[in-house]
């Protein structure tokens, strides 16, 4: 008998019919002889509706109350799935994050998991029940207040429970068939990957592949929890995230896939005095505005005037705040200008094999050049190459790289709309 | 400094605008130098919407999951009121029933309060915060599961907190100006009562006055919590429920008010063998179907055939089940027929003074007779007279009694629509 953790996103439980379908799958897994723990996100638009209500009553709702509000969404979806399971003749018991022993830090809206004490879940499993846990939420270690885990919270809940319960697999149900060699909406012959290593998946997620949240993958890697990404609309096997790039035979696949991202903006600080500590002061300024930066490029100093340009990318929504923060320190640092480009595209090639295969970078650049795409900024890791380009050239870039590295399959991929929390 | 508990029903928090109004009142009470604890019901139609969802996924949802589902409604409204208070510059902290220490029995959907441990609320009050508590919910003593308190649950939550915190007053905010001598929708000159004793209020509530739930009044009487019923739409003083009929000077008001009820049905079992134990077997049959009966009348035995008729009233919804249960035992008990009248009206006159004033019953009967109303069944307590009549004569009966006992005032009462949980 295996222990399976399943996580269903908001689109998988968006209405009563979808909830009943999800219940059927859960009961089937249970009847096959598995212990089953299920994590459910809030139904479809529930979170947006609650956010809208909050916005109507307060210009700046206190984060503690925001967490109390939003966690109601998962409470509702979990109870409804439990009812639907019960209607199929199986036993089910739903638990809040607090009841499930999900102990977190007290940073409301973005709490970290400190500890998982799943004793009540184990008891319920031992009694033969299917266990449901409200995703995205916990209870703070010190004040015992309700907390939420922020973006990717439900995926992270599922992985954390799988780790604590030593589950055999953590299945992430979504509206796509698995992890693809590129976005099938852009590349029709994109191939579903049977398996992918944690490291590659981390790079894919960090580079814009939305199917799994970076944080959940990091958690899974740390505790060695095999993740299976599957569609809640069919019975296809999906993709398995497991293993390390160190375990891959050198002869195996060089390149795993192409990821892209339209969610970033670019900031260039020009004419920065080329003296020690100036770059640090710029990045400290941005960090103090609580903004995460992604790619960084520092151009070579223009000889003569001893000044340099610093370029970095950041989430689009944070662009204006970064400009404001930098402009405020301009007199002190003495740079020339802040340029803000809120439209950049990022395309990335990921593959564990590229570290042992020379020529990947050359092929990468040739493919983009042949497609008429100008590379603005490049950044690499051991298993990834990323470049910035004009956003309207992004689709062309993805297709060109996918073709150049012969990642295409013979089947057309199926695409569904929607996404979960 | 006083400690005030305020309870707001679902109609008082039905949308963002009403929530902001409620927040203003709460903050005003706090600024006047009071500690304030607030209990809020679920917003307007939330409960009905959740029930509808449950109905769509399961024909018979398990009560444990139903409680998990429904309690989300109060979590949402409480967090929103806390946010609205915060937007007005005051501190607020919301708590679930479980966090507020509301320990109950484990009967899901109809749990009883076993104990209230309001330590976290006291701590928050000591820190100067306004405290919000999700009404209608608790946590079971044995299994630590989420429970709901059933009908009148939010009123009962408020009273129980007022008792546990030794509050100076428990204010119940609703959509009417207080407790009236009769329903102002029927009797335009019905008077708001300044004060009413617990016993009279209990009789009013039991006889159909919907403004307060019987259970909350019983709890308030047991712990001597003064209850003030007020409108959330204006600043009028409302009605105070306090004190015992024993404390009322004999010379004071004879009659308090007229209550009416359209929610009952009547069952008559005819030709019951007039031997010992037959009535008991009939009522045991009804009790085993988990049906509460209200008024009972056993007619005098028809001389000669030694048979009798037994009539009782019960909630309308339980009528068909009672008929089925009784029909099943007909062969065994040997009565003749079960008659089911699903349309009865009940009108009641309540007044602590009537026990010391002869002639009230006579005036009562004369008033109804003069209005052309036939009394079908009568039932009395020390401070109440109730009769059944045709439902289409109920309004006339209420008006006739209100006039006969000179209960009218000079002002017209204001009526709003809607009601809370």
Image (cartoon, coloured by chain):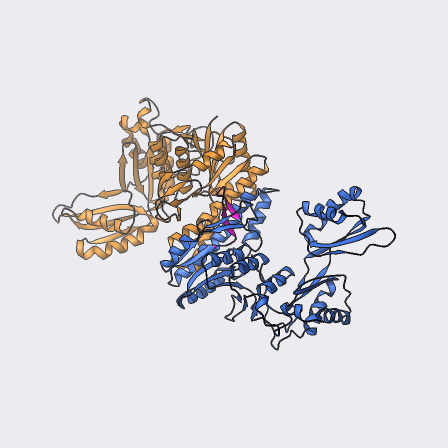
Chain colours: A orange, B blue
x and y, in percent, of residue B148 in the image: 53, 49
Residue A211 drawn above or below residue B74 = above
Residue A103 lies, in percent from the top left, at 38, 42
B286 versus A235 height, above or below: below
Quadrant position of the C terminus of chain A in the picture: top left
The magenta region covers B134-147
- Tell me: residue A208, above or below residue A408: below
Magenta segment includes B289:
no
* Residue at the (87%, 51%) spot, across then down: B305
Rendering coords of residue B104 (x, y %): 51, 48
Is B281 or A399 nearer to us in this picture? B281
Front-most of A357 and B77?
B77
What is the x, y in percent for residue A356?
A: 27, 26
Splitting the image into 4 quarters, where does residue A383 fall?
top left
Q: Is residue A269 visible?
A: yes
Quarter where residue B316 is shown: bottom right
Outermost residue to the bottom: B410
**Which residue is located at x 17 percent, y 48 percent?**
A278
């Amino acid at each position: 008998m295996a222990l399976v953790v399943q996580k269903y996103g908001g689109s998988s439980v968006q209405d009563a019919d979808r909830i009943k379908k999800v219940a059927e799958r859960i009961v089937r897994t249970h009847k096959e002889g598995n212990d089953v723990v299920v994590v459910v996100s809030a139904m479809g638009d529930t979170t947006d509706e609650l956010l809208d209500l909050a916005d109507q009553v307060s210009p700046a709702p206190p984060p503690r109350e925001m967490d109390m509000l939003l966690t109601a969404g998962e409470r509702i979806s979990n109870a409804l799935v439990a009812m639907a399971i019960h209607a199929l003749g199986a036993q089910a018991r739903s638990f809040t994050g607090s009841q499930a022993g999900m102990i977190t830090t007290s940073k409301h809206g973005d709490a970290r998991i400190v500890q998982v004490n799943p004793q009540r879940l184990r008891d319920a499993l031992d009694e033969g029940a299917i266990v449901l846990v409200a995703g995205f939420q916990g209870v703070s270690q010190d004040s015992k207040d309700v907390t939420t885990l922020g973006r990717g919270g439900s995926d992270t809940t599922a992985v954390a429970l799988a780790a604590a319960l030593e589950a055999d697999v953590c299945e992430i149900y979504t509206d796509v068939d698995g992890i693809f060699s590129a976005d099938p909406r852009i590349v029709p012959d994109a191939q579903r990957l049977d398996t992918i290593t944690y490291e590659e998946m981390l790079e894919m997620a960090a580079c814009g592949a939305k199917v799994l949240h970076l944080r959940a993958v990091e958690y899974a890697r740390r505790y060695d929890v095999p993740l299976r990404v599957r569609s809640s609309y069919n019975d296809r096997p999906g993709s398995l995230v497991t293993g390390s790039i160190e375990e891959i035979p050198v002869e195996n696949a060089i390149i795993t896939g192409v990821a892209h991202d339209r969610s970033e903006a670019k900031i260039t600080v020009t004419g920065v005095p080329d003296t020690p500590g100036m770059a640090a002061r710029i990045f400290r300024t941005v960090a103090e505005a609580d903004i995460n930066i992604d790619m960084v490029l520092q151009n070579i100093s223009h000889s003569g005037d001893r000044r340099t340009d610093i370029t970095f990318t950041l989430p689009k929504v944070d662009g204006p705040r970064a400009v404001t923060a930098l402009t405020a320190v301009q007199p002190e640092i003495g740079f020339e200008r802040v340029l803000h480009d809120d439209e950049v595209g990022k395309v990335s090639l990921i593959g564990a094999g590229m570290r042992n295969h020379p020529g990947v970078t050359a092929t990468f650049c040739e493919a983009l050049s042949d497609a008429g795409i100008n590379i603005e900024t490049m950044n690499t890791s051991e298993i990834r190459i990323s470049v910035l380009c004009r956003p309207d050239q992004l689709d062309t870039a993805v297709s060109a790289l996918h073709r150049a590295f012969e990642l295409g399959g013979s089947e057309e991929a199926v695409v569904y709309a929607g996404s979960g929390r």
